[in-house]
Amino acid sequence: MAGVVGRLIRCWCRRAVAGRSRSALPSGHPALHPGCCSLKVPALQLHVSKTAMGASQKDFENAMNQVKLLKEDPGNEVKLKLYALYKQATEGPCNTPKPGVFDLINKAKWEAWNALGSLPKETARQNYVDLVSGLSSSSDSSSQAKPEADRKQAEYETVVMTSEDGITKIMLNRPAKKNALTEQMYQEIMLALEAASKDDSTITVLTGNGDYYSSGNDLTNFTNIPPEGVEAKAKNSAILLRNFVGSFIDFPKPLVAVVNGPAVGISVTVLGLFDLVYATDRATFHTPFSHLGQTPEGCSSYTFPKIMGPAKAAEMLIFGKKLTAGEAYAQGLVTEVFPDSTFQKEVWTRLKAYSKLPQNALRISKQIIRSQEKEKLHAVNAKESSILQERWLSSECMNAIMNFFSQKAKL
Ligand SMILES: CCCCC/C=C/CC(=O)SCCNC(=O)CCNC(=O)[C@H](O)C(C)(C)COP(=O)(O)OP(=O)(O)OC[C@H]1O[C@@H](n2cnc3c(N)ncnc32)[C@H](O)[C@@H]1OP(=O)(O)O
């Protein structure tokens, strides 16, 4: 096992040099770059609670993730404050020697941490959560002030977001990579869903650009190992996964998948959380988790047995059986299948008609249905994510990823 891990880390490191995503973070905090920007945002400390209200670990993790989604750089002063609170919350009072006088950035970070003295970990955690919450709301309100057209596309690199005829369309846009989902893409889809939930459209659609709907998780995500090591990577990935799936569970409006081609992995499992799934007859549905040493996510361990019965769900989720569009329709995973030649025309005509239905009635009906099992879905999501966190460290999973990159083993 140690040999496998060593080999894989070397393989990951080599790939990380070429493929490090823009969300790669310096050590010490998951989303901080103190010193890389001179923007000043005064007085944000006003949001810092002076009382220890007892933020949970989950609140804290959510806040860490929220920092990555901030639309505006909060400035060095706030970033140092976040860094200090994060260190205090996770490690306690400053316990490292003061960096040398010329090591300006690390000295500033050290001083910010040291200034917190013996502030209890719980208070630091709460103050961190409060600070992020203040930043998120100020960032939200400033982005709301921007013209809609600016706000929509400018912020996305991996998805295309458009609104027309009461329909907001989020299109996965890495066709050369079969719309494999990078970490940046998970973040952008969450942002796009958040924006769609607040815009004036009636229906939200997720679809893919090119011949694939999506080939699922981009396996290079596992090559981008932070200095903290593979365990930290697995932990952060589990948080990202949980938040990503959570944003589908909580999505408040009718959500439609326009499955324009084959779908793999997580792009299939979350379909169980959509309200309508329209597929071209070219689409296939494949969840090869066991082949990859992994386990189901996207709440599929709960939704699939409910949708298609335990036997058919096991065939897909445990044994990795690939379904044709017709089979997926017969199992209840797909609402309707259309011939590829007329797919786009027929689907968009249908959706435009639906988008003219009374908006509030649609939204409230969706919410009544979802409310019956929202808590259950969140519990399943948490469990699946934590099991995967362990699985990603297994030799079975590491070997499968190595095979994909070294021998280009395809599904
Ligand atoms: C934050 C973490 C959350 C994690 C959540 C967990 C989710 C679990 C899953 O989603 S499991 C599913 C993972 N997906 C796969 O294993 C698919 C791997 N890809 C393939 O098997 C094939 O690429 C294919 C069958 C999808 C398509 O084969 P085809 O021959 O038609 O095309 P290519 O292989 O030449 O693909 C074109 C280029 O795209 C790259 N690519 C495609 N899919 C992925 C992917 N999932 N991850 C990384 N890269 C992918 C492929 O490597 C080609 O790149 P190249 O042109 O540079 O060679």
Image: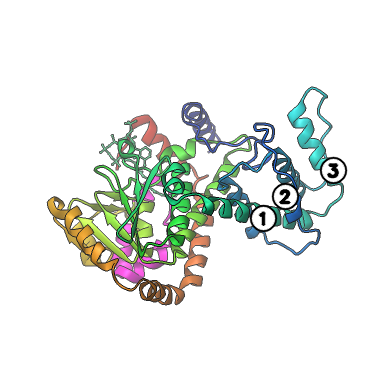
Q: Is residue 89 left or right of residue 192?
A: right
Magenta segment: 288-316
The three-letter code of the residue at mark 1 reads Gly
Query: How far apart are labels 2 and 1 at the CA level?
Result: 8 Å
Q: Which residue is mark 2?
A: 44
Q: Which residue is mark 1?
A: 134
Query: How far apart are labels 1 and 3 at the CA level?
Result: 21 Å
The vertical placement of 263 against 101, above or below, is below
Residue 335: name its quadrant: bottom left
The three-letter code of the residue at mark 2 reads Leu
Q: Secondary structure at mark 1?
A: helix
- The answer to which of marks 2 and 3 sits earlier in the sequence is 2
Answer yes or no: disc 3 within 8 Å of ligand 1.
Answer: no
- The answer to which of marks 1 and 3 sits earlier in the sequence is 3
The three-letter code of the residue at mark 3 reads Ala
Q: Which residue is mark 3?
A: 115
Q: Is residue 278 left or right of residue 217?
A: left
Dividing the image into four equal quarters, which quarter contains ligand 1? top left
Q: Is 312 included in the stretch rendered in magenta?
A: yes
